[in-house]
Amino acid sequence: EERPRGLLTLVAESVVQDVTSARGHGANRPVVDIITAVGAQEAAGALAAEPCHCVVLELGMEGEAARFLQALRGDAALAAVPVLVHSGQRTDTAVEETLRSRSSGTALEFLSSLDELRERIALHLSAEEPGDVLSLVRPDDPQRRAPEPVPDVSHAGRTVLVVDDDARNLFALSGILELHGFRVLHAENGRRGIETLLAHPDVALVLMDVMMPEMDGYTATAEIRAMPQYAELPIIAVTAKAMPGDREKSLASGASDYVTKPVDTQALMACVRHWLPS
């Protein structure tokens, strides 16, 4: 961006602080480094020096964004690194197409909202490898843009329990939910998930990973459903892949619905809002 520790750096820092504060200081707490570069030359040098999961690029710098993308063209290893381009306003289609032509295959996402930028940073940081997160703009429809997120104040303070043994998944799911005003609780397996649920009667919805040690999500969901007080509790199963039979097995165990990983922000929040209407 244009100056050291500018707005975009502060946004990234706030994402990391928000989504890791609930993790505590245990061994599974994600470690995230934020590197700020001023101008295209410094940015290209920083990206070449060490691997990054995503780049946040300020569009307002005179010519610097285009020069940075041009610098990436010569290194095939950097093509998979997603670049989140923030402009503060709706980007002109012609400008987008010009920058895409300069990027030569690099995954560009054009974002005008800081809230949307926060969500995408959280998702990309949770990915095991750069590029694992579905692009906000689908390759087969380059003109398509996601609608601007509308804050849903009716969900502020409502509690969601996330049951997952993978710190990266906790990081991503918690970040998305917290950005939408939810209070998030965590458990690392099905048994602890049931204990946490019983200890917190205010839980409004459960996101249940299906593959976990000690007690998997299918068993935990079935045990929760056996308790009369949780007969109507929304439980959304989170599966690693949309494999044949996953949906049926999740629903048979008592899940209300399911989403697949890597989790898409819009799909997740649409599912949550369906089961937790305003």
Image (cartoon, rainbow, N blue to C red):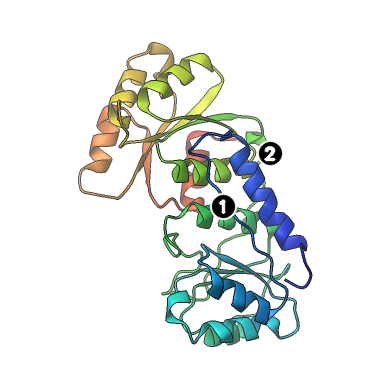
Q: Which residue is mark 2?
A: 153
Give the number of the mark in front: 2 or 1. Answer: 1
Q: Among all residues in the image, which is located at the extreme left?
A: 244
SS for callout 1:
helix
Identity of the residue drawn at 55% across and 72% down: 49
Q: Is residue 93 above or below residue 269?
A: below
Nearer to us in this view, 160 or 132: 132
Q: Amino acid at mark 2?
A: Val
Task: Please provide percent x and percent y for residue 112.
Answer: 68, 66
Task: Please provide percent x and percent y for residue 195.
Answer: 44, 17
Picture mark count: 2
Task: Please provide percent x and percent y for residue 129.
Answer: 42, 60
Q: Is residue 36 above or below residue 121?
A: below
Identity of the residue drawn at 69% across and 75% down: 59
Give the Cα distance between marks 2 and 1.
Answer: 21 Å
Q: Among all residues in the image, which is located at the extreme top?
A: 228
2 or 1: tag closer to the N-terminus: 1
Tell whether 246 sits left or right of 114.
left
Q: Which residue is mark 1?
A: 122
**Crowd rating for badge 2 (residues with CA inside 10 Å; few <14, some 14–19, many 20+):** few
Identity of the residue drawn at 66% across and 44% down: 17
User: Is residue 97 in view from this perspective?
Assistant: no
Q: Quadrant of residue 277?
A: top right
User: Is residue 109 in view from this perspective?
Assistant: yes
Q: Quadrant of the N terminus?
A: bottom right
